C-alpha cells in the first residue's frame, strides 16, 4: 500500500511539473477567440487544436521517456549537424517569438487597462527584470510557479463551469471553411510541440536527481503516466475555453483582440475583481515563462562553448534585447509574425517526435533522413504561402494533397516512411 501511494505521488508530482512547464499563460489567449469564431463546430475546432497543442506535445514527452536525453537527441539519427542546426533554430525562435509574446500579453492584460503607458516602456522594464532573474537564477520563480499554476487553474475552471451552466447551448455558424485544420494551425501558436522537445529534457534531469536508483524502465513508466495525466488536464482546459468562447459568441464585438476577449469572459463570468486578479496571475506566469526561455537558451549556447560564462551572459543580453524589440508589438502582430516560422519548424518537430516514439525497427537512420527531408521539402509551399505567395503557389498546391489546408507535408512524409520501411524489409 505504501509503495502504491509513493508511486502515485511521484506520478502526480511529475505530472504537475509537466503541466506547469507546458502551461504558458500566453496560450490561454488562443482558445477563447478560436471558440468565439468556431460557432456550432466548436468541437471540431477543439479536436484540431488539441491534436497539435496537446496530443503531439504529449507524444514529445513519450519520446523523451524513450530517449531520456535532451533536445539534441531528437535529430541525431538524421545527423549531428542537422540536430545542432535544428536545436539552434528552436532556441532562436523561442527567444524571438514566444518569449516577447509574454511581455505583450502582460501589457495588454495587466498594464494597458489600468495605466496609460506605452508598450515599449512595459517591454523595457519587463525584460530588464527578466535579465536580473536570468543572471541570478533565483529560486523564487520555482516557488512562484508552484503557487501560480493552481491559482490560474482554479479561476479557469470557475470561468468554464460558470459559462457552461449559465448559457444556453446555442451557437452561431462557424466562420471557418476548414474548422479542423484551422484548429490544428492555431494549436501551432501554443509552441507546445517545440516546448515538449525543450522542456522534456528538464524533466529527465529532475527525475534523475530525485530517483537516482530508478531503472530506465521505471523512469520510462513514470514519465509516460505523468505525460498522459498532464495532457488530460491541458485538454480539459483548452476544450473548456473553446466551448466557453463559442457559448459567449454574442457578448463581444467581432474584432475583439485575444487578450480583451479573455478578460471580458472573466469579467462576465466572475466579475471585475476576478478579472483583475487573473490579469496579475497571468502576468506573473508570463514572466516565469520568459525567464525559463531565456535561461534555457543561454544554458544551451553556454554548453556548446565549453561552459563559458561570458557566452551565457552575452546570450542572455541578446535574448532580452530581442524581447524588448518584439515585445513592444501587440499580441496579434506577434502571432502573425510567428506563423511563417511555425509553418516551417512545426512539421519537422512533429515528424521528429513521431519517429522517436516509433519502434526502432521502423525508425532506422535511413527512415529518419528520408522522412525529415521529405517533410522539409513539402513544408516549403506552406511556408511560402504564409508569407504572401499563396496565389502564385495555387497551381502547385493542386498536386499536393492537403496543401490547401497548409498540411501538404503530411501524406508525403507518411508515404516515404512506409516506402523506405518496405524497401528496407526487402533488402534484409
Image (tube, rainbow, N blue to C red):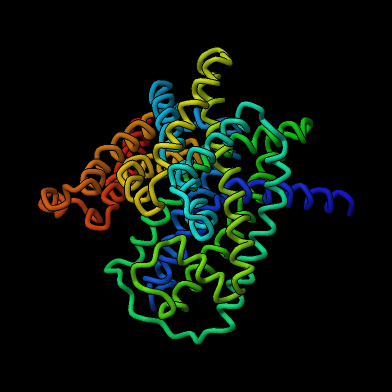
For residue 103, above or below residue 51: above
Q: Please report the residue visible at 44 percent of the width from the left and 54 percent of the height from the top.
A: 52
Q: Locate residue 163: give its quadrant.
A: bottom right
| Residue 54 in view, yes or no | no
Residue sitting nearer the eye, 88 or 181: 88
Residue 96 placement, left or right of 411: right
Q: Where's the N terminus, which quadrant?
A: bottom right
Which quadrant would the C terminus be assigned to in this image? top left
In the picture shown, does residue 212 fall above or below 4? above
Q: What residue is drawn where x is 35% and y is 31%?
A: 369
Is residue 65 something that shows in the picture?
yes
Q: For the view shown, which residue lies furthest in the right direction?
A: 2
Side (left or right) of 311 relative to 173: right
Residue drawn at (42%, 72%), measured in percent from left and top? 42
| Percent of width and height locating residue 385 | 21, 48
How many labels sit on residues?
A: 0
Give left or right: position of 327 versus 14.
Answer: left
Identify the residue at image location x=64%, y=71%: 158
Name the one closer to the observer, 125 or 286: 125
x, y (%) of residue 176?
A: 30, 69
Place of residue 256 in the rendered image (x, y in percent of width and height, measured from the top left): 38, 67
Across and down, in percent, residue 15 comes to: 67, 50
Q: Is residue 299 rendered to the left or right of residue 104? A: right
Amino acid at each position: 500500500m505504501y509503495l502504491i501511494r509513493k508511486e502515485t505521488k511521484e506520478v502526480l508530482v511529475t505530472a504537475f511539473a509537466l503541466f506547469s512547464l507546458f502551461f504558458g499563460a500566453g496560450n490561454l489567449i488562443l482558445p477563447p477567440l478560436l471558440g468565439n469564431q468556431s460557432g456550432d463546430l466548436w468541437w471540431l475546432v477543439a479536436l484540431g487544436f488539441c491534436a497539435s497543442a496537446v496530443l503531439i506535445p504529449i507524444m514529445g514527452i513519450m519520446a523523451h521517456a524513450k530517449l531520456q536525453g535532451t533536445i539534441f537527441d531528437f535529430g541525431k539519427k538524421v545527423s549531428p549537424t542537422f540536430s545542432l542546426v535544428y536545436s539552434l533554430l528552436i532556441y532562436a525562435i523561442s527567444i524571438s517569438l514566444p518569449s516577447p509574446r509574454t511581455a505583450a500579453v502582460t501589457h495588454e492584460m495587466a498594464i494597458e487597462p489600468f495605466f496609460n503607458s506605452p508598450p515599449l516602456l512595459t517591454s523595457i522594464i519587463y525584460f530588464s527584470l527578466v535579465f536580473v532573474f536570468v543572471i541570478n537564477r533565483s529560486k523564487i520563480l520555482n516557488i512562484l510557479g508552484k503557487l501560480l499554476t493552481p491559482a490560474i487553474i482554479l479561476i479557469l475552471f470557475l470561468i468554464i463551469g460558470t459559462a457552461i451552466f449559465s448559457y444556453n447551448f446555442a451557437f452561431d455558424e462557424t466562420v471557418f471553411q476548414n474548422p479542423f485544420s484551422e484548429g490544428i494551425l492555431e494549436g501551432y501558436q501554443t509552441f507546445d510541440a517545440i516546448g515538449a522537445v525543450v522542456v522534456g529534457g528538464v524533466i529527465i534531469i529532475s527525475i534523475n536527481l530525485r530517483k537516482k536508483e530508478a531503472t530506465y524502465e521505471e523512469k520510462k513508466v513514470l514519465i509516460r503516466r505523468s505525460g498522459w495525466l498532464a495532457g488530460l488536464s491541458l485538454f480539459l482546459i483548452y476544450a473548456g475555453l473553446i466551448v466557453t468562447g463559442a457559448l459567449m459568441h454574442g457578448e463581444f464585438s467581432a474584432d475583439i483582440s485575444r487578450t480583451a476577449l479573455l478578460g471580458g469572459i472573466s469579467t462576465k463570468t466572475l466579475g471585475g475583481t476576478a478579472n483583475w486578479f487573473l490579469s496579475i496571475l497571468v502576468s506573473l506566469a508570463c514572466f516565469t515563462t520568459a525567464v525559463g526561455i531565456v535561461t534555457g537558451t543561454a544554458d544551451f549556447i553556454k554548453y556548446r562553448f565549453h561552459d563559458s560564462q561570458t557566452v551565457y551572459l552575452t546570450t542572455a543580453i541578446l535574448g532580452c534585447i530581442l524581447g524588448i524589440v518584439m515585445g513592444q508589438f501587440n499580441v496579434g502582430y506577434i502571432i502573425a509574425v510567428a506563423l511563417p516560422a511555425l509553418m516551417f519548424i512545426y512539421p519537422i518537430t512533429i515528424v521528429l517526435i513521431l519517429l522517436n516514439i516509433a519502434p526502432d525497427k521502423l525508425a532506422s537512420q535511413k527512415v529518419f533522413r528520408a522522412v525529415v527531408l521529405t517533410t522539409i521539402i513539402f513544408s516549403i509551399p506552406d511556408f511560402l504561402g504564409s508569407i504572401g505567395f499563396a496565389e502564385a503557389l495555387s497551381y502547385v498546391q493542386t498536386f499536393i494533397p492537403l496543401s490547401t489546408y497548409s498540411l501538404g507535408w503530411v501524406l508525403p512524409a507518411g508515404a516515404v516512411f512506409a516506402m523506405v520501411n518496405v524497401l528496407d524489409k526487402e533488402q534484409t
